[in-house]
Image (cartoon, grey):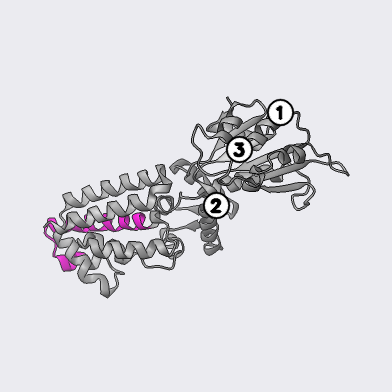
C-alpha cells in the first residue's frame, strides 16, 4: 500500500518517483491540495503554459468516458517532451480509468489528481493506495509546527524575523487553508517591508483585521453574557467570509487581558485604574461592556475560559470542516456561563 505520511511526503514532493507517475492528492485543506498539485505539475513538464504538455481534465466529465484518461496518458507528443495530466475530481467516480492506467507502463507523463476529503473505502483512494504505480497523499490542515515553519520560511524570504509574541498570535490566526495562510503571511511581509522584525502591532494592524469586519461585538457579547448578540454577530461574520479561527484568537487575547486585569482588582486595585492600564486603547463605546465583564467574572472563571478557548482552537484545527460550529458553540457557552453571576 502506497499512502505517504509525514517526512515521506516532503521527500516525494522534492523528488517525485518516476515509477509512481499517478499521484492522488486529497483532504480537507483545499489550499494545500492545490499548492502540492501546482508543484508536482510544474516539475513534470518543461513548459506548464503549453496546452500540449499540460492537459487539464474534469473528473465529472471523465466519469462518462474513463478510457479517455488512458488515451491521454499514453499519447506521445508530436515534438516529444514530457507531459502532465491534471484532474480535478468531482462527485462522480472515474476510478475505473485510473485502475486501468495503474496496470500500464506510463512514460514521460505524470497524472496529478486533486480531490477533497475521501473515505478509506472511496474507490479512487483505494485504487491509488493499492497500486504500485500510484501514490496517495493526504492533505490535512497545518499544525502548530507546520505553521511555525511556514511563517519562518515566508518571512525569511523577505529578510524578516518575527517576535515570539507576534509569532504565537499569528499562528493562532492561521491554519484553515495552506494557501490562505501563505497569502496572509506574504501580505504581512509586504506591510513590514523595510523593518527587521515583525511585531505584535503589525499582526493586529494587518492580519487580525484582514476581514474588514470588527470582531469586537462577538467577543464582547460572549464575555458580557449575551448569547443572542453573539449568535447574530457570529452569523454575520461567517456570511462575510471571516475565518472562525480569527474570532477565537481575538477571544483568547481578550480573555488573557481580562484575567490579568482581574488579578489586579482582586489584589485591591480600583476597577477604574485597572481599566486604564489594561485597556489603554479601548474605544469608548466598549468601555462599559468590558468593565462589566471585569466586575462579573473572577480570575478563576476567566482561567477556565482561557483553557476552554485553547481547547476550542485545537479542536478547530483537528476538524476544519466543523470549525465554524465548534467556535460558535464555545462562544455561546462562554456567554451562557457569563450570565451566571
Which quarter shows the C terminus?
bottom left
Q: CA distance from mark 3 to mark 1?
A: 14 Å
In percent of width and height, residue 133 lies at 67, 28
Q: Is residue 39 magenta?
A: no
Q: Quadrant of residue 266?
A: bottom left
Crowding near the residue tagged with mark 3, few <14, some 14–19, many ≥20 C-alpha atoms within 10 Å: many
In percent of width and height, residue 40 lies at 67, 42
| Nearest to N terminus: mark 1 or mark 2 | 1
Q: Secondary structure at mark 1?
A: loop
Q: Residue at x 15, y 54 (%)?
A: 298
| Nearest to N terminus: mark 3 or mark 2 | 3
- State which mark lies toward you, 3 or 1: 3
Judging by the rendered image, the residue that carries numbered circle 1 is 19
Left or right of 48 in this view: 312: left
Judging by the rendered image, the residue that carries numbered circle 2 is 179
In percent of width and height, residue 330 lies at 28, 51
In percent of width and height, residue 316 lies at 38, 47
Q: Is residue 213 above or below residue 147?
A: below
The reply to whether residue 239 is in sight is yes
Amino acid at each position: 500500500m502506497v499512502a505517504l505520511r509525514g517526512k515521506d511526503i516532503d521527500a516525494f514532493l522534492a523528488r517525485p518517483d518516476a515509477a509512481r507517475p499517478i499521484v492522488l492528492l486529497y483532504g480537507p485543506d483545499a489550499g494545500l491540495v492545490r499548492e502540492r498539485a501546482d508543484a508536482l505539475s510544474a516539475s513534470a513538464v518543461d513548459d506548464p503554459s503549453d496546452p500540449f504538455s499540460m492537459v487539464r481534465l474534469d473528473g465529472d466529465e471523465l466519469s462518462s468516458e474513463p478510457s479517455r484518461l488512458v488515451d491521454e496518458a499514453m499519447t506521445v507528443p508530436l515534438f516529444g517532451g514530457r507531459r502532465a495530466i491534471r484532474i480535478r475530481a468531482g462527485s462522480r467516480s472515474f476510478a475505473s480509468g485510473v485502475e486501468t492506467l495503474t496496470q500500464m507502463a506510463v512514460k514521460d507523463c505524470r497524472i496529478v489528481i486533486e480531490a477533497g476529503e475521501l473515505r478509506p473505502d472511496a474507490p479512487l483512494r483505494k485504487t491509488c493506495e493499492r497500486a504500485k504505480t500510484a501514490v496517495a497523499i493526504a492533505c490535512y490542515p497545518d499544525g502548530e509546527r507546520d505553521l511555525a515553519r511556514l511563517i519562518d520560511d515566508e518571512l525569511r524570504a523577505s529578510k524578516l524575523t518575527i517576535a515570539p509574541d507576534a509569532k504565537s498570535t499569528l499562528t493562532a490566526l492561521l491554519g484553515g487553508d495552506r494557501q490562505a495562510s501563505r497569502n496572509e503571511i506574504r501580505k504581512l511581509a509586504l506591510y513590514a517591508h523595510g523593518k527587521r522584525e515583525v511585531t505584535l502591532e503589525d499582526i493586529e494592524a494587518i492580519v487580525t483585521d484582514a476581514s474588514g469586519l470588527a470582531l469586537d461585538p462577538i467577543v464582547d457579547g460572549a464575555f458580557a453574557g449575551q448569547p443572542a448578540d453573539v449568535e447574530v454577530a457570529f452569523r454575520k461574520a461567517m456570511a462575510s467570509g471571516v475565518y472562525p479561527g480569527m474570532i477565537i484568537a481575538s477571544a483568547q487575547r481578550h480573555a488573557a487581558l481580562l484575567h490579568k486585569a482581574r488579578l489586579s482588582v482582586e489584589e485591591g486595585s480600583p476597577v477604574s485604574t485597572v481599566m486604564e492600564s489594561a485597556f489603554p486603547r479601548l474605544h469608548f463605546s466598549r468601555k462599559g461592556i468590558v468593565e462589566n465583564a471585569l466586575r462579573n467574572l473572577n480570575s478563576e472563571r476567566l482561567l477556565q475560559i482561557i483553557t476552554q478557548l485553547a481547547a476550542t482552537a485545537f479542536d478547530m484545527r483537528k476538524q476544519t470542516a466543523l470549525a465554524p460550529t465548534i467556535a460558535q458553540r464555545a462562544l455561546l457557552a462562554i456567554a451562557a456561563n457569563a450570565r451566571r453571576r
